Image (spheres, grey):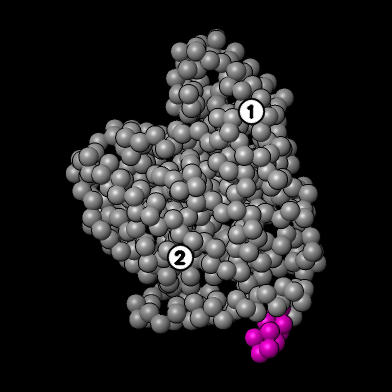
Amino acid sequence: MTRTIESALQDLSSGAVTSVELVTEAINRADTLDGTLGVFMARYNDSALAAAQASDDARARGEKLGPLAGIPIGIKDIITTEEGPTTCQSLVFDSSSFSGDATVVARLRAAGAIIVGKSTTMEFAIGTPDFSKPFPIPRNPWNTETWTGGSSSGTGGGVASEMFLGGLGTDTGGSIRIPAANCGITGLKATFGRVPKDGCAPLGFSLDHIGPMARSAYDCAVMLNVMAGHGPDDAAVADVPVTDYTAGLTGDLTGMRIGIDRLERKYTDLSAKAELAASFDALEEVLTARGATVVPVTLPFHNEVSTASLILMITEAFAYHRNDLRDQWDNYSRGLRDCIAMAPFYSAADVIQAQRIRRVGVKAIAALLQKVDVIVSPTTTAGALDFEQVYNMWDGPATVNLTGYWNGTGNPSMSVPFGYTDAGLPLGVEITGAAFDEATVLKVGHAFQQSTDYHLRQAPALTGELQPAE
Amino acid sequence: METRTTLEAAYTAAGVTPSAEELERWSHRYGQARAAADTLFDLPEVKYEDLAVVFRAR
């Protein structure tokens, strides 16, 4: 049986399992699989077991517990935790510059979550894995010859291989949603400003988001309940009321209008065209059966907003790293250099125009979302890439980025698994809503998952059919 | 060669020193990246648009 946060909370409440048992399961799985899958930068077994025991003791005493009491959680290693240093998976980053808990980690901890470790990424959440650097290479639990995608690679692989039940990712151009899609799990990029980002190393400060990754939309809702809301230490966090994101998860979509853009115009020769078409056909049937009306839509200014988002991500990142790039060029990973060293391609006018384009996109999407409740589009055009494709990713159209569009507009967007390639690799679909309306996004994702089990299917790494890495 | 010269100047101005291999490889990307950036100036919808405020806190 596949554990979820939802089922684990029920089992903890009924006494069917203890937090120590959950954490021990997670540790044992990591002992077995992490050497192959490269999920962790650091593991906190002792402190996690101590926290789990404390949680079980509090439960036994009948104390009031937080909404994530006893649940093992992984944290992407660009977000600070009090258990150990944050490395950003970099030889350049000064880990002494971060200490203590980020606000979002403190909120999870206060809700009773058990922090089991820091998960892998690409250096500073950008680029590609670099085999020449002394860090783990994240491999996909569905096929270890392929990458998890990034940059929340370890969090995606860790949830899919059940080394923790939920985790934190960050998303500047798709870094929650892409690994969620590639690993067959659910990942939510909430609205820009919905979750405070202090204590998180920046990539593109106007595009960065922290969000939950877990098996299901329900699990993401439970986590977002804890993570969302204004905080004093992030200038960009919005003071917008939060709600109980689990409250609307009824499975009923009666009266809702759902716009679908399959984005076939973006497909390449490498795209899983037939599999995506079949998955979309099936998805439309499910949503219709749940009471929704499905209508075709066209995402406005898709090329322009996507280009603007890419320019801003690259240039904002370059601004952050410029002096270190001057002094420590060779210490940076090849993939990071490949990406953010494109910044000098662009002029100041390009950057300003990108911001203006973005505003046009925000308005156009807001207008479209007056006509439909959510918009559904593919997260990726193909399954997980193999490492040769990854190595050349920035030099050619190995894949097409569909997710950065939503970083440019800032809308909440969640990837849910909805099919497989012919090679058996998961495919994901994005559900996107109006600004600060995560509740509707989660409602649609949850309803879809009431009729499907893609999010619960276990990867070969868990079923004993793990394909070993060379 | 012209693209490579342009890029060399841009990197020199930024104070970073890519390897010859990197410079060569990135030279092949420049045309496509430049063309994509140029399309951002072609949209009439942008003419009267202010600078971005993505979402204002209510």
Q: Horizontal and vertical percent for residue B14?
A: 71, 76
* Gap in angstroms between the C-alphas marked 2 and 1: 37 Å
Please give the chain letter of the residue carrying mark 2: A
Q: Which residue is mark 2?
A: A268
Q: Earlier in the sequence, mark 2 or mark 1?
A: 1
Q: Which residue is mark 1?
A: A29
At 49% from the left and 77% from the top, the residue drawn is B36
Residue A426 on the magenta segment: no
Q: Amino acid at mark 1?
A: Arg
Q: Which residues are magenta?
A: B1-11
Q: Locate residue B39, reporting x and y percent.
A: 45, 79
**Camera-side mark, 2 or 1:** 2
Q: Secondary structure at mark 2?
A: loop
* Residue A454: quarter of image: top left
Q: Is residue A140 above or below residue A67?
A: below
Residue A346 appears in the picture as rendered: yes
Task: Using residue A89 as the reference point, say whether residue A206 is left or right of it.
Answer: left
Number of other residues with Cα within 10 Å of mark 1, as a class: few under 14, some 14 to 19, many 20 or more? some
Say if A337 sits above or below A422 in the image. below
Note whether A139 is above or below B47 in the view shown: above
